[in-house]
């Protein structure tokens, strides 16, 4: 029996983690649950799973939550409550959206837990701070991102001492998002609704917009570099609209190993919870009895400049990824509020990166500051050049 903590329990990743646990109740037990403000859903989950501890991010809701959870359930509050909760299970699922998930990533690894990381932003923005914590005794970082879960599995095919020498290339697949094949004139007119309509994956709004700009893939390139220690020159992106091949590893002898399944996040979630074992429930298993076609094409780097902005920030290193990530979160927020057009997401991030100050990622404060500065640059862009 593996104990599981879920942060972001009422969000997209959290809800799918709950489904995995419900499918295999003999294997997993939820001991800790946290949500920012969805108090009714959190209380309902607490009554179903009877965790030892719950946390609510919004302090104004704490008293109400205390009245709604089963007797004996400890209630923690705010960001500190989140960090504490992230030490209370063998596997900690970080399903928080955006840079706000950093504290949980640091807390889970420094307390020697397995971190099932759906919050890629914390690793991307704070790689230099997260990396040393991975060597904490007991700590383990398993990605809950379909591409990185795929690569994790592909690399197991050559899992012996010195394997790194034989890796030629990681190939991250991208669906291409809803605007694949669109020209620059069409992209000027993109609406919020269109950006939120992903062709293959049902996800939260932030990551769905990131997928439409290819920034999600750019962030995943940095994530792959941090997770697997592979040089940026050895990380390739290929557009694969069906989202069946979740990513690949090519070795020096020419062999390419891929992981395939229908797009279903419950597979990578279950993989991270059960590793090195596998669960007995199939999520996303392919029916090979029907005909299928799989397509691959290079990404359109001109109309989707976010991809190369992310490569550039990753290659620069230090606090550049945090700066860019902060700028991206601000730009996506501005787009979702109707303050900027879709192409301005990329141009405002580019403007922010041009002002990057080169600060070292020597502390949490330095990373938080870079994140803030990136956001401020986008705000300035909006007030001067934008709307
Ligand atoms: Mg992904």
Image (tube, grey):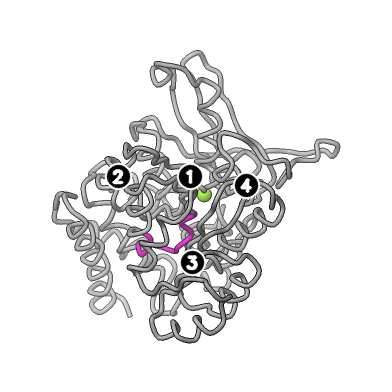
Inter-mark Cα distance, 3 to 2: 37 Å
Tag nearer the camera, 1 or 4: 1
Q: Which mark is residue 53?
A: 3
Q: Are marks 2 and 4 in contact (CB under 8 Å)?
A: no
Q: Is residue 86 left or right of residue 70?
A: left
Residue 77 in the image, given as x and y percentages of width and height: 39, 74
Residue 107 in the image, given as x and y percentages of width and height: 34, 54
Q: Which mark is residue 241?
A: 4
Tag nearer the camera, 2 or 1: 1
Tag nearer the camera, 3 or 1: 3
Q: Which residue is mark 2?
A: 314
Q: Residues within 10 Å of mark 2 (few under 14, many from 20)?
A: many
As drawn, the residue found furthest toward the right would be: 289
Residue 185 appears in the rendering: no
Mark 2 C-beta closer than 8 Å to ligand 1: no
Q: Residues within 10 Å of mark 1 (few under 14, many from 20)?
A: many
- Mark 1 residue element: strand
Q: Which residues are magenta?
A: 93-101
As drawn, the residue found furthest toward the top would be: 253
- Pick whichever of labels 2 and 4 is earlier in the sequence: 4
**Along the line of sight, the residue nearer the viewer: 284 or 245:** 284
Inter-mark Cα distance, 1 to 4: 22 Å
Q: Is residue 45 left or right of residue 90?
A: right
User: Which residue is located at x 65 percent, y 37 percent?
Assistant: 260
Mark 1 C-beta closer than 8 Å to ligand 1: no
Judge whether 25 appears above or below 337 on screen: above
Inter-mark Cα distance, 2 to 4: 25 Å
Q: Which residue is mark 1?
A: 143
Tag nearer the camera, 3 or 2: 3
């Amino acid at each position: 029996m593996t104990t599981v903590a879920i942060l972001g329990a009422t969000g997209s990743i959290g809800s799918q983690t709950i489904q995995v646990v419900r499918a295999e109740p003999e294997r997993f037990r939820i001991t800790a649950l946290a949500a920012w403000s969805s108090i009714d859903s959190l209380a309902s989950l607490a009554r179903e799973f009877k965790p030892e501890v719950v946390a609510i991010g919004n302090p104004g809701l704490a008293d109400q939550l205390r009245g709604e959870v089963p007797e004996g359930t400890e209630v923690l509050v705010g960001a500190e409550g989140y960090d504490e909760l992230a030490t209370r299970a063998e596997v900690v699922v970080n399903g928080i959206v955006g840079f706000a998930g950093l504290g949980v990533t640091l807390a889970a690894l420094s307390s020697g837990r397995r971190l099932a990381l759906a919050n890629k932003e914390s690793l991307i923005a704070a790689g230099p701070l997260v990396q040393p914590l991975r060597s904490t005794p007991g700590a383990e970082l398993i990605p809950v991102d379909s591409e990185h879960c795929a690569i994790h599995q592909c690399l197991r095919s050559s899992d012996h001492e010195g394997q790194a020498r034989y890796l030629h290339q990681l190939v991250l697949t991208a669906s291409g998002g809803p605007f694949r094949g669109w020209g620059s004139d069409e992209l000027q007119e993109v609406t919020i609704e269109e950006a939120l309509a992903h062709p293959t994956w049902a996800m939260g709004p932030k990551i769905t917009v990131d997928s439409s700009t290819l920034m999600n893939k750019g962030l995943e390139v940095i994530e792959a570099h941090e997770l697997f220690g592979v040089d940026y020159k050895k990380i390739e992106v290929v557009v694969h609209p069906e989202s069946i091949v979740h990513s690949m590893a090519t070795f020096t002898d020419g062999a390419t190993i891929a992981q395939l399944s229908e797009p279903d996040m419950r597979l990578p979630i279950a993989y991270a919870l059960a590793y090195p074992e596998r669960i007995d429930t199939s999520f996303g298993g392919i029916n090979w009895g029907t005909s299928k076609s799989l397509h691959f094409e290079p990404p359109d780097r001109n109309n989707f400049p976010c991809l190369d902005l992310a490569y550039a920030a990753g290659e620069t290193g230090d606090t550049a990824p945090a700066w860019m990530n902060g700028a991206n979160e601000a730009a996506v927020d501005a787009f979702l509020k109707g303050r900027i057009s879709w192409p301005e997401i990329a141009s405002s991030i580019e403007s922010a990166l041009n002002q990057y100050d080169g600060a070292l990622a020597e502390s949490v404060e330095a990373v938080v500051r870079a994140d803030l500065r990136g956001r401020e640059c986008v705000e300035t862009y909006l007030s001067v050049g934008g709307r």
